[in-house]
């Protein structure tokens, strides 16, 4: 598939996706969804060890492209659930289940489902000038693409409620202070830090990190007993692989580990 709305590259084991509709602050249209879905399938098939997602231009993503639907008087009522079932929900689940760390470099505003997609990623970095907006309430909509799942878990009910009912702009620095994201960085350091992390993950024990993210995401809905069982099953599995052996041997030999990702 040729991409027109995203930029995609796979260099060694680092996959990079840049949402690329800068004139619309990278708002999602159907074509961009299809291209992004294809890129994630390629990333998985290529055994990449890290994915870096960012946006072109001054925004990260303004959510759903509001020009895509005809809402003029007399136009048929839309089925908004269809777009979620067909595109957003599979995208979120795909990002969450990719067996590698997914870094999101939020280079500018992330609004509506754009914020949701950023928060679906495992490590979220943001430029100081970036912001997060739960824009849904301004359109009379319910937050979607996982927003009502992430927000209360990350920042608590009171802040999730305020953000979602008011739709105020949350600056990146405050997002970091509230624990919504991993790190806020000066604008001119964002991509360098994102690339530094991508390089780090490209030689990391990928399978262990994939299990780690699965376990952390599962913990939100598990009891302690269930989580202990999950950790046990994952640790048993990981113990059979190359990287555990290599990690311990490298430690004993006092040398850097050479992880294969398995
Ligand atoms: C846009 C958009 C946009 C089209 C900026 N669409 N053009 C899921 C499934 C099904 C249905 C519905 O919804 C959903 C989930 C959602 O995502 S709902 C939420 C949709 N997103 C929004 O409501 C955000 C709308 N955008 C904004 O509020 C502002 O653009 C923000 C606050 C993001 C940025 O403001 P500014 O920095 O002042 O930029 P701007 O407003 O001037 O935008 C720049 C251009 O981008 C402008 O075009 P123009 O031709 O005038 O330069 C905007 O029209 C266009 N644009 N967002 N979502």
Image: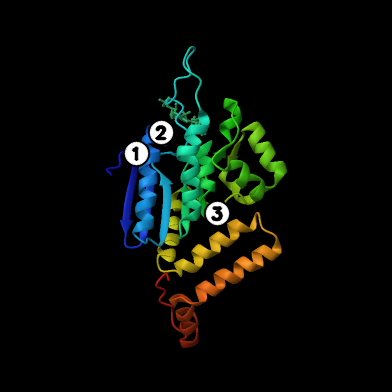
Q: Helix or strand or loop: what does disc 2 sit on?
A: loop
Question: What residue did someone put label 2 on?
Answer: 29
| Distance between the alpha carbons at the discs numbered 2 and 1 | 9 Å
Q: Few, some or many C-alpha atoms within 10 Å of disc 3 (few <14, some 14-19, many ≥20)?
A: many
Q: Few, some or many C-alpha atoms within 10 Å of disc 2 (few <14, some 14-19, many ≥20)?
A: some
Q: Helix or strand or loop: what does disc 1 sit on?
A: loop
Residue 262 % position (x, y): 43, 71
Name the residue nearer the viewer: 51 or 98: 98
Residue depicted at 39% across the width and 45% down the height: 37
- Residue placed furthest toward the bottom: 253
Q: Is 196 above or below relative to 109? A: below
- Is the distance from the Cβ of mark 1 to the nearest ligand 1 atom less than 8 Å? no
For the residues labelled 2 and 1, say whether their Cβ atoms are less than 8 Å apart: yes
The answer to whether residue 180 is visible is yes
Q: Is residue 176 left or right of residue 130?
A: right
Coloured how?
rainbow
Q: Few, some or many C-alpha atoms within 10 Å of disc 1 (few <14, some 14-19, many ≥20)?
A: many
Image quadrant assignment for residue 55: top left
Residue 183's disc number = 3
Residue 144 % position (x, y): 56, 37
């Amino acid at each position: 598939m040729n991409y027109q709305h995203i930029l995609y590259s796979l260099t060694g084991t680092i996959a990079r996706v840049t949402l690329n509709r800068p004139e619309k602050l990278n708002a999602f249209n159907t074509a961009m969804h299809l291209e992004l879905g294809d890129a994630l399938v390629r990333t998985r098939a290529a055994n990449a060890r890290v994915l870096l997602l960012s946006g072109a231009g001054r925004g990260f993503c303004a959510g759903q492209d509001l020009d895509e639907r005809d809402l003029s008087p007399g136009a048929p009522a839309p089925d908004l659930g269809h777009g979620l079932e067909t595109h957003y929900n599979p995208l979120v689940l795909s990002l969450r289940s990719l067996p590698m760390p997914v870094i999101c470099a939020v280079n500018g505003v992330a609004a509506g489902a754009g914020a949701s997609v950023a928060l679906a990623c495992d490590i979220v970095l943001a430029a100081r000038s970036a912001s997060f907006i739960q824009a849904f309430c301004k359109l009379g909509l319910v937050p979607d693409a996982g927003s009502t799942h992430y927000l209360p878990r990350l920042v608590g009910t009171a802040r999730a409620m305020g953000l979602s009912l008011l739709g105020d702009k949350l600056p990146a620095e405050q997002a970091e202070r509230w624990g919504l994201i991993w790190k806020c960085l000066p604008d001119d350091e964002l991509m360098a830090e994102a690339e530094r992390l991508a390089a780090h993950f490209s030689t990391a024990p990928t399978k262990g990190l994939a299990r780690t993210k699965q376990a952390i995401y599962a913990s939100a809905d598990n009891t302690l007993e269930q989580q202990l069982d999950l950790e046990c099953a994952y640790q048993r599995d990981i113990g059979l692989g190359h990287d555990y052996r290599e990690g311990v041997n490298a430690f004993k030999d006092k040398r850097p580990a050479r992880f294969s990702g398995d």
